[in-house]
Amino acid sequence: MPHVVAIDQGTTSSRAIVFRGDLAVAAVAQEEFPQSYPAPGRVEHDPEDLWRTTLATLRAAVARAGITAADIAALGITNQRETTLIWDRADGRPIHPAVVWQDRRTADLCARLRADGAEPEVAARTGLLLDPYFSATKIARILDDVPGARARAEAGDLAFGTVDTFLLWRLTGGRVHATDATNASRTALFDIHTGAWDPDLCRLFRVPAALLPQVRDSAADFGVTTPDILGAPVAIRGIAGDQQAATVGQACFAPGMMKSTYGTGCFALLNTGETAVASRNRLLTTVAYQLAGRRTYALEGAIFVAGAAVQWLRDGLGLIAESAEAGRLAAAADPAQTVHLVPAFVGLGAPWWDADARGALFGLTRGTTRREIARAALEAVGHQTADLIEAMRRDWGGEGRTVLRVDGGMTASDWTMQFLADILDAPVDRPVIRETTALGAAYLAGLGAGVLPEPAEFARLWTLDRRFTPAMDPAGRTARRAGWADAVRRTLSTT
C-alpha cells in the first residue's frame, strides 16, 4: 500500500504524520519550538527552528511507521499562513527572524495606507483587508529594517516565502521556489480573480516582484526532496495553507459547507464555490483550494486567539496545570456569575479588525475564581465563532442552521464543543480524524501523485465521531450574546 506523508508546520510546533493508502494514520511525530516576543505586539520565530523541527519530525515519523522513502508515494506540506521569511538565494540563510502571522508591528503602515484610501482596491483584488496579519507589509518592513536588503531584493538576490515556500526550498535543496494559490492568496499581493501576482499591489506595498515564488495548484508537482532528507528522493505533490488544508481534510467541497479549526487561533471557512463573494461584513475572501487550474473560493473569519487563551491560563497566569483542566473547571463554574474574557492579546480579527484592541476581563466580583475565568476563556471561542458565522450568513445569504465541522486541539473538550453548539444554536460535527489539517495536505499530495481518488470519492470517506446538538434555552443564549457584545464594545480601541 503506498503511503503519503504530511508535514504540518504550525505556530507552536512542527509535526509529521504518515498516512497509509487508506488514509489511516501509521505514525506521528511532533516537536515544539520556542516563541519569541521581542516587544509588545511582536512575535517571531527562528527560521532554523522551523526547519530543524520539520526535518526531525519528518524523519522520526517515517522511522516509526517502519517504512522507507521507496514506500512513500508523495509528501504534502501544510503550514502556518502569512508568517513571512526572506532568505539569501545563494546560501538559503534567512536575513531576519520569521515575522509571525500574529505580529502587529506594521499596524501604523496599515493605518497610513487605509487613510490614503488604499483598502477598497486591496480588498477588491485580494479579498483581504489592510491589516498587519497579512504578509505584504511584513515583507516591506523586513526590507526596510535590514540594511541593504531592499537593494538586494531588487537585484534578485533574495527570496520571499511563507513557511511552505521556505520548507520547500530547503527540502529541494534550493531548486524549487514556489507556493500554492492558497498561501499566495494570504499575502495581499495576489489577485485572487486572475490567479497571479499583482504588479500594482507590489508597487503599493513596495515589494520587489523578484522576491516572489511561482504559484501552482494545491495538488501539483513541487519537485522532489534531496536524497539526504529520507535516504532517497521523495516527490512533493501537495501544498496548502493550514486552514485551507483543513477545509480539504473536512471534505468541505460543496458550496455552503463550513469548517472551523481550533488551534492557537480559530479560523472558520465557508465554501462559496467558483464565486469569490465580496464580504460586506469585514470577512475575508480567499482561495479555498486550486485544482487543475480552477480556483474554489471561501469566506473566512479569523480569530487570533482561541487555544492560545488556554495556554495563557496555563503558562501566563498559572491557573491550570494542563490544558485539559480548563474544561473541568468550566463545568464546575458558578452559573450565577457572568464573566467575559475578550482575548484581544494581539488585537481583534474578524469581523472587527482592530489591531489596537487589547484583552480584557469583565464581570469580575469578589466571588470570581479560576473556574469562572477558565469558563470565560472557553466561552470566548464560542462567542467569536458565533460572530463569524452570523457575518457569513449575512454575506452568503444562507438561511437556517448551519452544520459546522470542527477540528483542531480544542475539539477534544466536550464541554467546549457543547457550548459552541449551544451558542450557535446549530449542530457541531466532530470527525473521527481530528487532524484534518494534516489529512488535507496528505490528500492533496496523494491526489497530485495519482494514488488517491477525486474529491467526491474522498468526501465519502469522511466519518463522524460525535454530533453536538444545541440544548441552551433561547433566553439564556440571547442574554449571553448580549453580554459578549457589550464586552467587545468596551474592548475596541475605537470606542
Image (spheres, helix red, strand yellow):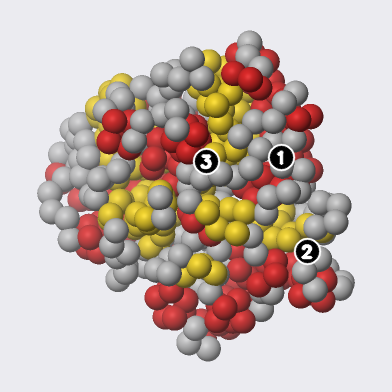
| Side of 32 where 402 appears, left or right | left
**What is the crowding at mark 2: few (fewer than 14 residues within 10 Å), some, or many (at least 20)?**
many
Circle nearer the N terminus (1, 3): 1
In space, the residues marked 2 and 3 are separated at their CA atoms by: 25 Å
Residue that carries the numbered disc 3 in the rendered image: 238
| Mark 1 lies on residue | 171
Q: Residue 338: x, y in percent?
A: 34, 45
Image point 21% across, 36% down: which residue? Answer: 427
Instruction: Report which quarter residue 313 is drawn in.
Output: top right
The amino acid type of the residue labelled 2 equals Leu
Residue 73: image quadrant is top right
Q: Secondary structure at mark 3?
A: strand
Of 312 and 440, nearer the camera is 440
Q: Is residue 142 visible?
A: yes
Q: Nearer the viewer, residue 418 or 404?
A: 404
Q: Which residue is mark 2?
A: 158
Mark 2 in CB contact with mark 3 (< 8 angstroms):
no
- Neighbour class for label 1 at 10 Å: few (<14), some, many (≥20)? many
Residue under the image location 40 percent in, 35 percent down: 249
Left or right of residue 271, residue 165 in this image:
right
Disc 2 and disc 1: Cα gap in Å?
18 Å
Q: Quadrant of the C terminus?
A: bottom left
Amino acid of disc 1: Leu
In the picture provided, is 142 more to the left or to the right than 354?
Answer: right
Please tell me in which quadrant of the rendered image residue 154 appears. bottom right
